[in-house]
Amino acid sequence: MMSTEKEMSTKYDPTAVEAGRYQWWIDQGLFKPSGDKKAHPYSIVIPPPNVTGKLHLGHAWDTTLQDMIIRQKRMQGYDVLWLPGMDHAGIATQAKVEARLRKQGISRYDLGREKFVQQVWDWKDEYADIIHKQWAKMGISVDYDRERFTLDKGLNKAVRKVFVDLYNKGLIYRGTYIINWDPQARTALSDIEVIHKDDKGAFYHVKYPFTDGTKFNGKDYIEIATTRPETMFGDEAVAVNPHDERYKDLVGKHVRVPLVDREIEIIADDYVTPDFGTGMVKITPAHDPNDFKVGKRHNLPELNTMNEDASMNENAGKYEGMDRFEARKAMVKDLEDQGYMLKIDPIVHSVGHSERTGVQVEARLSTQWFVKMKPLAEAALKNQETDDRVNFIPGRFEHTFTQWMENIHDWVISRQLWWGHRIPAWYNKKTGEVYVGMEAPKDAENWEQDKDVLDTWFSSALWPFSTMGWPDTDSADFKRYFPTNTLVTGYDIIFFWVSRMIFQSLEFTGKAPFRNVLLHGLIRDEQGRKMSKSLGNGIDPMDVIKKYGVDALRWFLITGSTPGQDIRFSYTKMDAAWNFINKIWNASRYVIMNLGDMPAPVLPEKSKWDLADRWILSRLNATVKQVNTQFEKFEFGEAGRALYNFIWNDFCDWYIEMTKEKLNNGTAEEQANTKNILGYVLDQILKLMHPIMPFVTEKLWQSMPHDGKSIMVAKYPVAHDEFDDDAATEQMSHLIELITAVRNIRNQANAPMSKPVDLIIKVENDHLAETFKANKDYIDRFCHPEKLIIGTDVETPKLALSGILTGAEVDIPMAELVDLDEERARMKKEIANLEKEVQRSAKKLGNENFVKNAPEKVVEEERTKGKEWQQKLDAAKDRLASLQDA
């Protein structure tokens, strides 16, 4: 097939390159699985972004990593499915919509449940459209025909089945416990939805008077320190440690709660730490999780003193209706005025805040639905000891997973929200009986469904298999693409999502949901700070794409990425990324112009390859091997570095330059051979780069003569043993070193490349002499010698500029252009640098651990380098000695 896009501008223009290309891919159906039943399936489910707003740079990084994996696997012949979707995000989305309504002076209660939920669906549609456009900009090759939403009908069926089955197994239960409460969203939170921040606070030391005239240390009261005076109305006891000798006579005595005429007993409980504070603790069962447990052990009442919005309720006396913090101020003043306050010690302490609304969380006594986690966690941990284990990349994150699973608490899954999956539980209006089922009871008029919804993570925990058609286990996608192969996500949601997907998948499918989980870090600004609205350092990926193009952004995200590590965004690196693509563009333009209307490149017979051809194909082969190896290890940054070095240095800076003589002055056969090899190598480069830079590689490939519809479904490069050529690599390295040395000498002497000069090359052995003589054409082209002398016993002129090579020395007699003092200084500087390299190598080889533990090949390479540095050092010293005599 001939090329379809012949026109190429003289400069890389990302806007023109990207225009219309994404839609063309979609129209061609290239994002769909191949359907080839003989091919191995490979599947990824996208971590569904929340429909709470636009995607940020972190999403761009996440989707780029997935797209790169998917594109490579597609080119390698796998039957690839990348399933897209979005998350309804429960509390997060509801909070956004409520905030929008508040600006209009409306609350959800003004609208009612049905109309409010419709408002949220409208929000979802608005932001889903924005996310779709951003996905298109990023070039992600997902199968839109299979797109899912965590609140769609299929997901709802899966959610209901999981809830009902866990309930019937006794793994879901309803109970009254202390839970985390968000008073703004008015809903329960799980432990991991609470973010702890340092807040300014105080220890308030308050008198609790004895009720029967008891004296303790000569006083008619005990001293209690609390950080939350507003919870005092819920106090049901004061506790001391049973082994604390100081207070053993006080156990059973009664004290009065200040500001309220209520007696509470002094009890003994091991919960109290004797050496913390006064060793006496007020017990408030309805407002503290530890106090709740103490209360259960001692059959204490549970008195809740706050409303859902954290205002004080009827149990707070005259403070009823006041906001909790306003009540605190008023109570502190009253305690001071009435003589109960002993002192106030300012402190900074860690306080829980809602991850979504940011408000301070309350510990609240509440009836909620819970998942009994211990058996599920144990099954997940046990599975890690089997062949079905999940591989964490980097491996250190498995410890994070294990630690959380080993110390897990029961999971509160009910949320007092209107946006989400309704809990499939109904209560009989007359008897209070609870019914849990897939559908409502038949006599529905006598039953009322639970008003709460399920935690967002309950539905997203089912994502890898529910999106494949489960609970229909005969679903074609479920049978073909589940379990998935790789999950790519941030390390910050191991607890929230990764862990929950693992235990739910094991429970309901008997299999781990994915083979690998690749965890990346956060994108930070150039100073290493987390991007946030408060700092004003957030960067919109769409703005970056508008300036540099998406391929440059993708290249930056990939080459700056090491599994598990954070990345710093940098405009300097974005400039470098654009420059690299422009380099590829210009090199491709040169090749494509020379290929003209010839058919798709075919390598000539090996006997027709000259040294440069053999070398570039050997270097290509080494790069293909390295890129494939690093991709399999998810070390994409290393793969990117290998590609950069090969493309920029080997192909653009050296091989292309070496082809110009033959293309301009060679025979017809030489020109044809050179064009085919140039075209072949460029074809392989574009295919290697396509998973990272899809747009520009498609444009360039379509501008070349090629066989195929799209580079996206072209065959990904594989290694060819016949390309390996150590001799060509060695010979070329000597030539490159020689040419580089001559160029450096000319620059130092301010002698232009166009000026012919005498070159005297003294070599250590005949083999190297033959290498230089056999490639005299390259030396003539790149060094422009007037006279060229090569030998083992040639006489080196004293008044010359020198370059020290591996196994050789090159001299240019240029005394009239050279300041001898400057040349002596240059040689001294070079000797100092060489001495450092010799010392470094000797120190490394002198390290027993390195010699013992490093691979034998690495140690041997270091020994070889050490010898080469020593040889260069000896030659440089000889050269300086000759200059001293000049």
Image: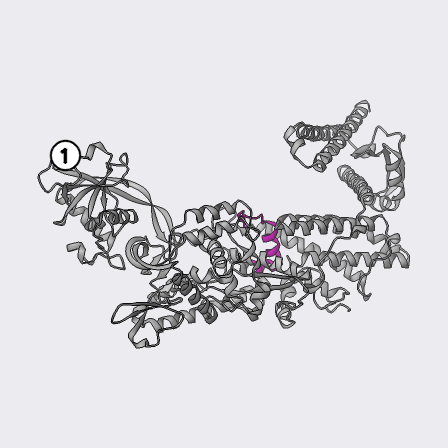
Residue 804 location (% of width, % of height): 78, 33
Q: Amino acid at mark 1?
A: Phe
Magenta segment includes 567: yes
Q: Could you say which is closer to the camera, residue 539 or residue 340?
A: 340
Q: Residue furthest front?
A: 169
**What span is in magenta?**
544-569
Residue 148 location (% of width, % of height): 51, 68
Q: Could you say which is closer to the camera, residue 689 or residue 475?
A: 475
Residue 170 location (% of width, % of height): 38, 59
- Could you tell me which quadrant the N terminus lies in? bottom right
- Asked which colour scheme the image uses, the reply is one colour
- Give the tally of numbered discs: 1
Q: Residue furthest top?
A: 885
Q: Is residue 782 above or below residue 871?
A: below
Residue 804 in view (yes/no): yes
Q: Which residue is mark 1?
A: 216
Q: Could you say which is closer to the camera, residue 665 or residue 691?
A: 691
Q: Quadrant of residue 605?
A: bottom right
Q: Quadrant of residue 847?
A: top right
As drawn, is 619 to the left or to the right of 494? right
- Could you tell me which quadrant the C terminus lies in? top right
Q: Residue furthest left?
A: 213
Q: Could you say which is closer to the camera, residue 817 or residue 441?
A: 441
Residue 194 location (% of width, % of height): 37, 52
Mark 1 Cα shell of 10 Å, populated few (<14), some (14-19), many (≥20): some
Residue 450 in view (yes/no): no
Magenta segment includes 19: no
Q: Is residue 812 above or below residue 377?
A: above
Mark 1 falls on what kind of element? loop
